[in-house]
Image: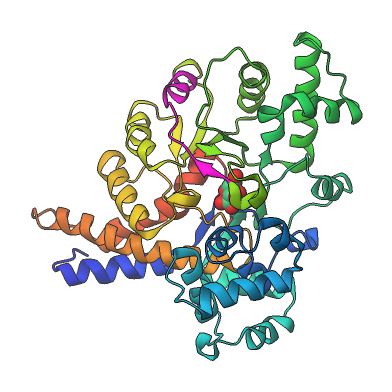
Amino acid sequence: MTITTEKGIRKTVEEAIDNQPITDIHTHLFSPNFGDILLWDIDELLTYHYLVAEVMRWTDMDAASFWRLNKKEQAELIWQKLFIERTPVSEAARGVLTTLQEMGIDPKTKNLDTYRAEFAGRTAEAQVQAVMEQANVSNIVMTNDPFDEQERAIWLDGMKPQDNFHAVLRIDPLLNDFENTKESLRAWGYDIQEKWNEQSIAEVNRFLEDWIGMMSPLYMAVSLPPSFAYPEDSDRGRIIRDCILPVTKKHNIPFALMIGVKKRVNPDLIDAGDFVGKADISALENLLAENQENKFLVTMLSRENQHELAVLARKFRHLMVFGCWWFMNNPVIVNEVTRMRMELLNTSFIPQHSDARVLEQVVYKWKHTKTVLKDVLTEKYEDVRSTGWPVTKEDIEKDVAALFQENFWNFLEKDFRR
Ligand code: RAT
Ligand code: ZN
């Protein structure tokens, strides 16, 4: 049915977005059967590293003293400084309030202990279900790190995620710190030579194959510094060329590159101490041009890289642009970047992922994203409608399904459960 008014466009877009199940293509969550590496509850929400970075601006405490506090004490300090002594207007602070509200916990008491009591009676399994229903997220894609001792042990024990959680093989140490990583690989029985030769290549590939076998990952992923270059006469350049590209191609899985993070510019802050830098996108251009049969999922951290990234996707259909990552995930930037991507790419991109580290963040991250996307899509369809072109409810629903779920699975060439 053709929509005849601007009000009709808005209502249809809002309903389509609210009714659309989502595949959250990048999170740091775990299937609940993986045990306590899945983070959840109010103290975890408050100690999110985005909020740690913010609280350090309002206290004289040095970072070492902050980290010596236990989790509850850290949460109390953040609560006091960011929520009680001032109004929580930042995106990460507002997110806590949205989460409480959407989960039926009235934030008006301003009393941390009453919120703690609300979470105390819940189980991880029930909370996973409640969060996924609330946010209408039907599939969660994890980040799985074979170099993390705790997580490694879980996989080696033969644990598999529940049906709607999907693995991703994350390989940062392999590409960003090969000097140390090759020692770990050797300790695990992979006979990496001092020289980069046929045997070293075969052994790194054997490691990747073993973990692909264990995890069945949807894609292989890495985060990279702004200085990332390709091709490059370096460990990283060689491993990408000789191992990552052939192995991902063989398994027909994308290589996901998250480019632009300057790790630990303030090391004392740990995860909260990472910064952003503009990357030289010619590295990606070279990868795409030279590897037409590979698939690349890419997000970039710097606002300055967003335009050229979208333009590059017009040149190479084996590039799928995804998400507004980390410092990009602010409504003002999501709004601008999503508009630009639609203007350059139609709906052939993946607008967002939650990047949730704490389960309940899925609720606010998607709520905030949906609010922005409703505005953006309404404007775009209204622009089309006002030319006299008939826009129908089915057109809008089809596009929304593509953006929130189908572009991802189609790019993977995989079936999925809605
Ligand atoms: O957004 C974040 O939580 C970052 O610390 C990173 O985890 C980033 O998303 C990544 O996947 O490297
Ligand atoms: Zn992440």
> Toward which corner of the image does residue 197 lie, by quadrant?
top right
Q: Is residue 357 above or below residue 41?
A: above
**Residue 25: % across, % down:** 55, 50
Residue drawn at the location 47% of the way across and 22% of the way down: 283
**Residue 78: % across, % down:** 60, 71
Residue drawn at the location 89% of the way across and 48% of the way down: 157
**Residue 402: % across, % down:** 41, 50
* Farthest-out residue, front: 60
Please count the marks in the image. 0
**Residue 404: % across, % down:** 44, 55
> Toward which corner of the image does residue 55 lie, by quadrant?
bottom right
Asked whether, in this view, residue 331 is left or right of residue 380, the answer is right
| Residue 248 falls within the magenta-colored stretch | no
> Toward which corner of the image does residue 114 lie, by quadrant?
bottom right
Q: Is residue 284 above or below residue 212?
A: above
Range of residues picked out in magenta: 274-288
Q: Which of the image's four quarters has the N terminus? A: bottom left
* Farthest-out residue, bottom: 109
Residue drawn at the location 47% of the way across and 71% of the way down: 94
Of residues 81 and 182, the one nearer the viewer is: 81
Asked whether, in this view, residue 335 is left or right of residue 50, the answer is left
Judge whether residue 49 can be spotted in this image: yes
